[in-house]
Image (tube, rainbow, N blue to C red):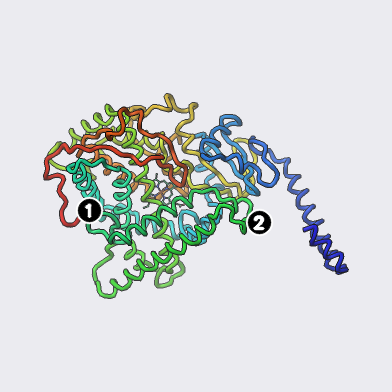
Amino acid sequence: MIMGWLQIFASGDIIQATSTIFLVLISLALLSSSLRKTSWKLPPGPRGWPVVGNLLQLGSFPPSALADLNAKYGPLVYLRLGHVHAVTTNCPTIIKELTTAQDDAFCSRPSTIASEYLGYNGYDVALAPMGGHWKMMRRICLEHLLTTKRLDSFQKYRIQEAQAMVHAIWEESRAAKVCNLRDHLSALGMNVMTHMLLGKKYFGAQSVGAVESSEFRNLIHDQFWLLGVFNVGDYLPYLRWLDIHGYDRRMKEVGRRMDQFHASIIEEHRQRKQHDKDGPRDFVDVLLSLPGEKGEKSLTDIEMKALIQDLIAGATDTSSVTSEWAMLELLRNPQIMQKARDEIGKVVGSQRPVEERDLNQLPYLKAIVKETFRRHPPGAFIVPHKSLKHTKVAGYDIPKGTVVFINVHALGKNPAIWDRIDEFLPERFLNGERIEFRDADYKLVPFGAGKRQCPGASLGQFMVMLGLARLIHSFDWFLPPHMSTVDDIDMQEVFGLTTHPATPLQAVASPRLLESLYSCSSSC
Ligand code: HEM
């Protein structure tokens, strides 16, 4: 910049020089006015570095780094991430305040490079800023796709896929193979969702085929990873062109390939619709039958693609990673696994498989899932919220545009609200009341809260509970031969949009029901 001024003066262009000085003066004025705003009483937090602020303090596992800051500075911590105001909390009272009393102020989303490339520029639901478009997209989810009636009509797919998983594990057990539970659970989550959404399954028998399935799996994997990264360009936009970690380039490429994938799905459905007079068979058929926002005959292709993208991303990894952590804890705690099996046995017996209608009668299994959400929430942070106006929380000023990181990873390990935090204790939720996933005092918020809370919560619960119930009821589970005690199970977590066990969970399955209960009809 200094070189630029010198060149201007050297060239003798006095008008340009004057306007440059004018701009500098305005910038200084703006800077001093922003400094004056330091009269704001911001929440406490660590001192930041010039320019980057606290970006370098996030570490390799940001949920733990931010939890340490909460322990040091209090329940609401202020951070400056580059030029972005941010706050973080692991406290139920503050979470309640942000998502109920002040929901209107905090219900937007930050606009990020990820939302640009992977959320159709905020044209989707999950990453869209608050506004008319988000309202319309959310209404479509709630009134047309995720209704109880629609979900009931797709129950057969969930049962089919759960049976396909049990069958595949049974075959592996007969071949004396160690079972990779991550593979089975992610195939279950993915197949249930793509079956309902796109009318296809991507893994196992009757799937689309190896090439399309592996391409799809890699795309979803990359998308998940990229949605979870802290991208420097979001916080220091003038450095975006440097693309320090190469995230922009990857996001652009993944977004382009996802878009092609969605376009071909929509085209296939349009072709079929011309010859097929039956009602909608899957969510894409439903989307094709809906009118547009302002009375147009149909939704635009971008709206349909953005919805497909969100539902696949929102539904698949969240439920499979929850189930993987639950199975990991059950292997570490065989007495809890047995208690759950006894409960299922009492309700279901041993002559038939578990059905969805059984799930409401399995409070202990539900408590296991709840304890998994506490100890290993699938997303360490709730999808970040953003404030729409200047407001006060707990007596502190929160500037307009502040990004809010609700740290559910740290909430579940907050010693001020939980006893014996490192133990897996489903019993803590068996207090005689009906067990709800949404906790009235905000100690557990696996599906978020307020206007942005997860619209797929009940489907997510069904998917997790059905998969687990089938695994526990159908098999006895043992450690793989390379492990001698439960302490050999790797408990390390890998940070991303969802937090996975560092090592995919492996175990040995031994069938415990009649052989006929492991068979798979041609449909699965
Ligand atoms: C165990 C399963 C699941 C978990 C733990 C989960 C968790 C979450 C969380 C924490 C949020 C953010 C809430 C907030 O910002 O306050 C969210 C949003 C969302 N979820 Fe889920 N989810 C699950 C399953 C599903 C399923 C099955 C679907 C759809 C089929 C879905 C679709 C969405 C969508 C579209 C949003 C964005 C909502 C908005 O911004 O308005 N999720 N989910």
Q: Amino acid at mark 2?
A: Tyr
Q: Quadrant of residue 446?
A: top left
Furthest-front residue in view? 482
Q: Amino acid at mark 1?
A: Lys
Kindly identify which numbered label has been placed on residue 156: 1
Furthest-bottom residue in view? 274
* Labels 2 & 1 near each other (Cβ < 8 A): no
Residue at the image position 53 percent from the left and 34 percent from the top = 67
Q: Which residue is mark 2?
A: 238
Q: Nearer the viewer, residue 202 or 408?
A: 202
Kindly identify which numbered label has been placed on residue 356: none
Residue 132 visible here = no
Q: Nearer the viewer, residue 455 or 472?
A: 472
Q: Is residue 176 above or below residue 257?
A: above
Q: Residues within 10 Å of mark 1 (few under 14, many from 20)?
A: some
Residue at the image position 78 percent from the left and 48 percent from the top = 32
Residue at the image position 34 percent from the left and 57 percent from the top = 214
Q: Is residue 319 above or below residue 334?
A: below
Q: Is mark 1 within 8 Å of ligand 1?
A: no
Kindly state the secondary structure of the residue where label 2 is placed. Answer: helix
Q: Is 222 left, or right, of 168 in this rendering?
A: right
Q: Nearer the viewer, residue 201 or 373?
A: 201
Q: Quadrant of the N terminus?
A: bottom right
